[in-house]
Amino acid sequence: ISRHIRWQLLLGLAGIALLVALLGISTYSVPTVVIPDRGGVFREGIAGTPQNLNPIWCNDDTVDRDICALIYRGLTRMDKSGKVAPDLAEGWTIDNDRIYTFRLQPDLYWQDGVRLTSADVLFTIGVLQDPDLRDIPGLPSLWRNVTVEQLDELTVRFSLGEPFAPF
C-alpha cells in the first residue's frame, strides 16, 4: 500500500511541476496586447494647484505645463522617440531654414463644431505678438520677430528673419 501511495504522490507532483512549467512558458511566450475601449472617462491626478490654464502662461509652473499638455494641441508634437511629428498640421515644408509652411488637417473641429482653420492659427500668433502681453522671458520677443500669413483656409506660413533651430 505504501508503495502504491508513493507512486501516486510522485505522479501528482510531476503533474503539478509540468503544469507550472507550461503555464510559465506560456506567460512569457504569448504576447498580450492591451487595446483600450472607446468612450469612458479618463482621469489623471496632479500634485499641486494650477495657477494658469491659458496655454501662453503654461510654462510658468510644472502643474500648469502638465495640464496644458493634456488639453491643448500644437501644430506639431514630439513623438515617443523625441522626433517632431504632426499634430494639428498634417505636414509642413521648411525653405532656407527660415520659412515654415504648415498645412492643417482638414477634419479638425473645435468643441462647438466649428472647423479649425489657418485663421485660428493667425489669431493665436497675434495674441503672442501683442505688445501688451505680459513678458514671459523669451516668448513674446521670439514671436514678435516672426511674420505669419494665411495662404489659404488650411495653410499658414511663418517667416523668420534668420534661421532659428528651436523654432
Image: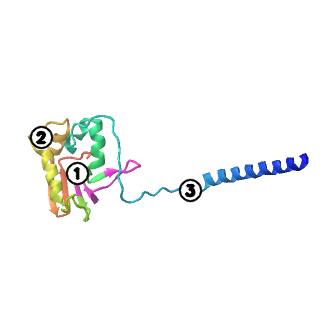
Q: Is residue 89 visible?
A: yes
Q: Is residue 155 above or below residue 164?
A: below
Residue 72 appears at what percent x and percent y?
26, 49
Residue ID for mark 3: 31
Residue 139 appears at what percent x and percent y?
19, 40
Residue ID for mark 1: 98
What whole-number distance in Å separates the C-alpha atoms at marks 1 and 3? Answer: 46 Å
The tag earlier along the polypeptide, 3 or 2, is: 3
State the residue at coordinates (35%, 50%): 42
Question: Please, what secondary structure does the residue beneath circle 3 have?
Answer: loop
Residue 153 appears at what percent x and percent y?
17, 64
Q: Residues within 10 Å of mark 1 (few under 14, many from 20)?
A: some
The magenta-colored residue range is 77-101
Q: Residues within 10 Å of mark 3 (few under 14, many from 20)?
A: few
Question: Please, what secondary structure does the residue beneath circle 2 have?
Answer: loop
Q: Which image quarter: residue 144?
A: top left
The tag earlier along the polypeptide, 1 or 3, is: 3
The tag earlier along the polypeptide, 1 or 2, is: 1
Q: Which image quarter: residue 135?
A: top left
Within the magenta stretch, is there residue 45?
no
**Label drawn at residue 133:** 2
Residue 83 appears at what percent x and percent y?
37, 50
Q: Is residue 41 above or below residue 138?
A: below
Q: Is residue 40 above or below residue 55?
A: below
What whole-number distance in Å separates the C-alpha atoms at marks 3 and 2? Answer: 53 Å
What whole-number distance in Å separates the C-alpha atoms at marks 1 and 2? Answer: 25 Å
State the residue at coordinates (16%, 56%): 120
- Tag in front: 3 or 2: 3
All told, the count of numbered labels is 3
Amino acid marked by disc 2? Leu
Amino acid marked by disc 3? Pro
| Contact flag, marks 1 and 3 (Cβ < 8 Å) | no
